[in-house]
Image (tube, rainbow, N blue to C red):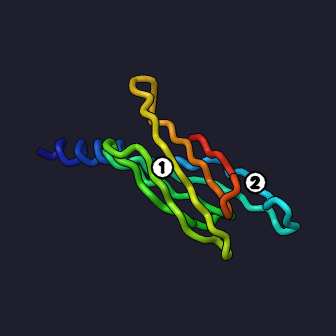
């Protein structure tokens, strides 16, 4: 019985891992304003993954995908800029973990395409 509890904890921890990608820089078209760093964080779960889109290291958008729904559309604002992200998941099967692609737009202009 003593060996069962640590084994269950190990299985749960193996199913929950986090991935952070290197942020991409975005300069708004026609603006002399600052550049924005767009990044993403992914927390793998047993059957549900949580996606977080960041701008300048601030969590701006959050969504999730499941085994049954491999996409997520998120929207919000950052400093009065409308931000949208459309993310899709592709299961790589035996080759490895799920691969995500997120297209992020600022005011309906392509800002970044994140692949992780």
Classify the position of the N terminus by image quarter: top left
CA separation in Å, label 2 and label 1: 22 Å
User: Which numbered tag is attached to residue 25?
Assistant: 2
Q: In the figure, is residue 7 to the left or right of 22?
A: left
Q: Residues within 10 Å of mark 1 (few under 14, many from 20)?
A: few
- Residue at 75%, 54% in the rendered image: 25
Of residues 13 and 1, which is closer to you in this image? Answer: 13
User: Which numbered tag is attached to residue 18?
Assistant: 1
Question: Seen from this angle, which residue lies furthest left?
Answer: 1
Q: In the figure, is residue 44 to the left or right of 35?
A: left
User: Residue 10, how many percent across, how many down?
Assistant: 30, 44
Q: In the figure, is residue 63 to the left or right of 81?
A: left
- Residue at 79%, 61% in the rendered image: 28
Determine whether label 2 and label 1 are within 8 Å by CB.
no
Q: Which of the 4 quarters of the picture holds residue 104?
A: bottom right
Question: Seen from this angle, which residue lies furthest front?
Answer: 108
């Amino acid at each position: 019985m003593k060996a069962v509890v640590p084994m269950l904890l190990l299985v749960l921890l193996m199913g929950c891992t986090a991935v952070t990608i290197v942020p991409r820089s975005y300069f708004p078209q026609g603006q002399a304003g600052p550049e924005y760093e767009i990044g993403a964080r992914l927390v793998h779960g047993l059957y549900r993954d949580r996606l977080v889109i960041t701008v300048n290291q601030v969590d701006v958008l959050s969504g999730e995908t499941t085994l049954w729904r491999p996409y997520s559309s998120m929207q919000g604002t950052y400093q009065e800029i409308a931000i949208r992200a459309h993310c899709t998941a592709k299961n790589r099967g035996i080759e490895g973990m799920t691969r995500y692609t997120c297209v992020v737009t600022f005011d309906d202009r392509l800002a970044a395409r994140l692949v992780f």
